[in-house]
Image (spheres, rainbow, N blue to C red):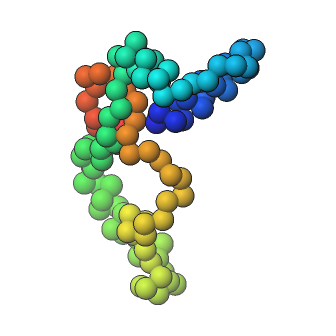
Amino acid sequence: MSGPILQEKVQQFDFKLGHENFRASNEWLQNFKKRNELIFQKVCGENAKVDDGVCTEWKYKLPELTKGYEPENIYNADETELFLKCLPDKILSCKGDKCHGGK
C-alpha cells in the first residue's frame, strides 16, 4: 500500500466515524509510520522457484492457446508497457520484513 492510498483510506474511515475535519497530511503519515515502525520498501520481483512440471505443462498448453493467431498478434504482457492499474513501486511494510514473492 502506498502513502497516498493509506492517507485516502484513513480519511474515508475517519469521515465514516464522524470526524469531518481530519486531514491525513504528509506530516500525519510520517508520524504514523514512525509510531508504528513502518517503512516504504521498494517492491521486488518474485523469488519463489517455479515447479518444473508447471513449465513442462505450459509448453504443451501454449500452442493450443495461441492456435489461430498470427505470431505478430501474440504478446508477452511484461513487454507491452501497458499499465491497467498504476500501482506504486513502493509498499508500506514493517521494519525488518524481507521482500519476497512480489511483496
| Residue 28 x, y percent position in the rendering | 50, 21
Image position of 23 with respect to 79: above or below: above
Residue lying at 43% horizontally and 17% vertically, measured from the top left: 31
| Residue 48 x, y percent position in the rendering | 26, 43
For this rendering, which residue is in front, 23 or 83?
Answer: 23
Image position of 85 with respect to 99: above or below: below
Q: Quadrant of the C terminus?
A: top left
For this rendering, which residue is in front, 31 or 65?
Answer: 31
For this rendering, which residue is in front, 9 or 50?
Answer: 9
Residue lying at 50% horizontally and 52% vertically, measured from the top left: 86
| Residue 56 x, y percent position in the rendering | 29, 62
Whether residue 31 is visible to the viewer of this picture, yes or no, is yes
Instruction: Report the side of 67 relative to 34 (left or right).
Output: right
Where residue 92 sits, quadrant-wise, is top left
Image position of 79 with respect to 24: above or below: below
Residue lying at 25% horizontally and 22% vertically, measured from the top left: 96
Where residue 71 sits, quadrant-wise, is bottom left
